[in-house]
Image: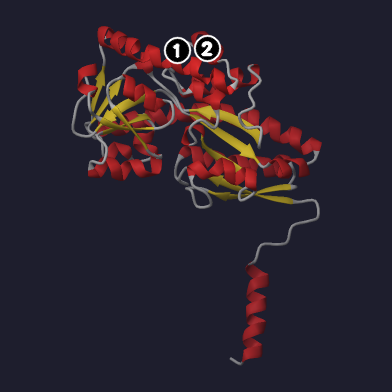
């Protein structure tokens, strides 16, 4: 084949398989997510993008980048603000101190479910006039189901058993681990499997779903459930402000409706995947320990100062932490 013929073929191939150019009224947005593509939360994020395309009749298109392929978890918020990504989904706890109001929700307040945690986070954040994400356009928040202590090789049945254990944790949950006698080790979920497998950490604080979603059920031997001190982690979905401003008011309203629908879906999905995670542990004969009432009460006493002191501490950041805690507890109490 001569050079001219080769060039003609190359142009034909590119024309045939390249994505069609955007129309004048179309906007393409890059969506960065920390979760792997196989995770239910990642699948929901991808379906959000498809729903946005549908309600805007294709005027807003979403290019989806899961699994940290565009940005890692702790980079996502700043990456959206700077325009590296246009939409981002990550854990607020990965950037310690950056989001003071939502960090309060991660305290061990005894979250019974992902649906309850998600409702509390969104309702209270709105009621308190939250501005943690003011540098971007907040789409919605959601939060996982009750987070527990898991270990590889050692059982935790009492506070004494926690002493000296290196427990992977993030954000405020690290303070809970410390109050229970453990040694917190800051770490993103993507690094947790190998760290448990190699003994870098003795255990991890995470929700039940992570035993499937992040395959952690393969590298733990014990899960200790203490519902009175169950924590959560708050996740955000945000959009670059300049990109949001390019979207028409009508399409913005349509996207807001999708957001309201999807945050409920995320909360429900956390609970569905918690059930799957429990089945995974049972199938692997992982020891599941439910603390008796007296021991549970002792754990609640141990973490109480963490809740009060943290809520008081963030007053310096302009957040009435005690009011946030009270409102979150009221929301949770009304859902039980």
Which residue sits furthest front? 316
Residue 283 sits in quarter: top left
Tell me which residue sits at (32%, 38%) in the image.
216
Picture quadrant of residue 297: top left
Give the answer, above or below, for where 334 lies relative to 146.
above
Give the x, y percent position of residue 269.
Answer: 48, 30
Q: Please tell me which residue lies in front, 260 or 196.
A: 196
Among numbered discs 2 and 1, the one appearing first in the sequence = 1
Q: Quadrant of the N terminus?
A: bottom right
Task: Give the residue at x 73% y 44%.
Answer: 242
Residue at 49 percent across and 41 percent down: it is 74
Q: Which colour style is shown?
A: secondary structure
Q: Is residue 333 left or right of residue 204?
A: right
Q: Nearer the viewer, residue 304 or 287?
A: 304
The CA distance from mark 2 to mark 1 is: 7 Å
* Mark 2 neighbour class, 10 Å CA radius: few under 14, some 14 to 19, many 20 or more: some
Residue 86 appearing in the image: no
Tag 2, which secondary structure? Answer: helix
Q: Residues within 10 Å of mark 1 (few under 14, many from 20)?
A: some
SS at mark 1 in the image: helix
Q: Residue furthest bottom?
A: 2
Q: Position of residue 66 (x, y in %)?
A: 51, 48
Q: Is residue 296 left or right of residue 129?
A: left
Which residue is tagged 2?
322
Quarter of image, res 331: top right
Q: Which residue is mark 1?
A: 308
Give me the disc on residue 118. Answer: none
Please name the residue shown 62% across and 90% down the image.
3
Q: Residue 159: percent from the left, percent from the top?
A: 24, 17
Answer whether labels 2 and 1 touch (C-beta < 8 Å).
Answer: yes
Tell me residue 223's x, y (percent): 27, 27
């Amino acid at each position: 084949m001569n050079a001219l013929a080769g060039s003609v073929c190359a142009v034909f191939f590119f024309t045939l398989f390249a994505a069609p150019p955007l129309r004048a009224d179309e906007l393409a947005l890059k969506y960065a997510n920390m979760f792997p593509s196989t995770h239910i939360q990642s699948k929901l994020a991808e379906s959000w993008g498809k729903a946005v395309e549908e309600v805007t009749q294709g005027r807003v298109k979403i290019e989806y980048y899961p699994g940290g392929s565009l940005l890692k978890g702790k980079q996502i918020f700043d990456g959206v603000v700077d325009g590296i990504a246009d939409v981002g989904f990550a854990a607020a706890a990965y950037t310690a101190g950056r989001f003071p109001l939502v960090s309060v929700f991660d305290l061990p307040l005894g979250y019974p479910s992902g649906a309850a945690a998600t409702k509390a986070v969104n309702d209270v954040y709105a009621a308190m006039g939250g501005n943690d994400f003011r540098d971007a356009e907040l789409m919605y928040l959601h939060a996982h189901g009750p987070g527990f202590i898991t270990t590889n090789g050692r059982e935790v049945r009492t506070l004494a058993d926690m002493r000296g254990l290196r427990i992977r944790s993030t954000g405020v949950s690290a303070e809970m681990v410390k109050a229970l006698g453990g040694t917190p080790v800051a770490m993103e979920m993507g690094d947790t499997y190998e760290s448990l497998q190699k003994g870098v950490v003795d255990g991890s604080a995470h929700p039940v779903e992570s035993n499937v979603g992040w395959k952690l059920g393969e590298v733990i031997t014990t899960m200790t459930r203490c519902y009175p001190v169950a924590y959560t982690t708050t996740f955000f979905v945000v959009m670059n402000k300049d990109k949001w401003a390019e979207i028409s008011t009508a399409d913005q309203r349509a996207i807001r409706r999708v957001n309201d629908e999807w945050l409920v879906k995320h909360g429900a999905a956390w609970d569905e995947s918690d059930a799957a995670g429990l089945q995974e542990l049972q199938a692997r004969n992982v020891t599941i320990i439910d603390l008796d009432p007296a021991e549970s009460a002792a754990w609640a006493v141990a973490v109480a100062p963490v809740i009060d002191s943290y809520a008081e501490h963030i007053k310096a950041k302009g957040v009435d932490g005690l009011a946030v805690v009270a409102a979150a507890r009221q929301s949770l109490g009304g859902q039980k």
